[in-house]
Image (cartoon, grey):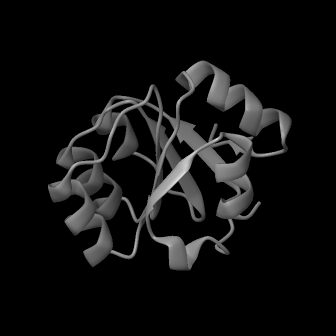
Amino acid sequence: MKIKQIAELLNGKVVCGEDYLDRSVNSVFASDLMSDVLTLKSEDLLLMTGLGNVQTIRTAEMSDINTIIFVRNKKVNEEMLKLAEENDMVLIECPYSMFKASGILYQAGLEPIY
């Protein structure tokens, strides 16, 4: 599924990476525990989290994840934005809970990582 479609489904606001909205994502991992994210090995993975700080961006960078959805109305700050831009990442702010957003994406055909 294209990132642009995902943003639309989640009523999300793309705050970084508008040039990459045609990228495809095959699976989603939802977590606020960045230690769990570091254990993942998957391509075309989207990270969904409510952890809105620069550590999320750094963890995604180390895990080769280039798309992050911030749920629960978490906002991207300037430091996060700068680091994401340097790494060609897409950041989306979503008003929904992680549970609701996960359900919407699962219903739309995206797969869980496990």
Residue at horizontal 44 percent and vertical 31 percent from the top? 31
Image position, residue 76 (x, y; %): 30, 47
Tell me: residue 66, above or below residue 40.
below
Image quarter in which the C terminus is found: top right
The residue most toward the left is 79
In this image, 105 relative to 41: left or right? right
* Residue 87 in which image quadrant: bottom left
Residue at horizontal 61 percent and vertical 20 percent from the top? 99
**Front-most of residues 6 and 95:** 95
Image position, residue 89 (x, y; %): 41, 68
**Front-most of residues 16 and 60:** 16
**Front-most of residues 35 and 3:** 3
Image position, residue 13 (x, y; %): 52, 50
In this image, 38 relative to 103: left or right? left
In this image, 80 relative to 24: left or right? left
**Front-most of residues 28 and 72:** 72
Image position, residue 24 (x, y; %): 69, 68
Tell me: residue 108, above or below residue 7.
above
* Residue 102 in which image quadrant: top right
In this image, 55 relative to 5: left or right? left
Residue at horizontal 28 percent and vertical 54 percent from the top? 57
Residue at horizontal 64 percent and vertical 30 percent from the top? 101
Image quarter in which the N terminus is found: bottom right
Tell me: residue 20, above or below residue 35.
below
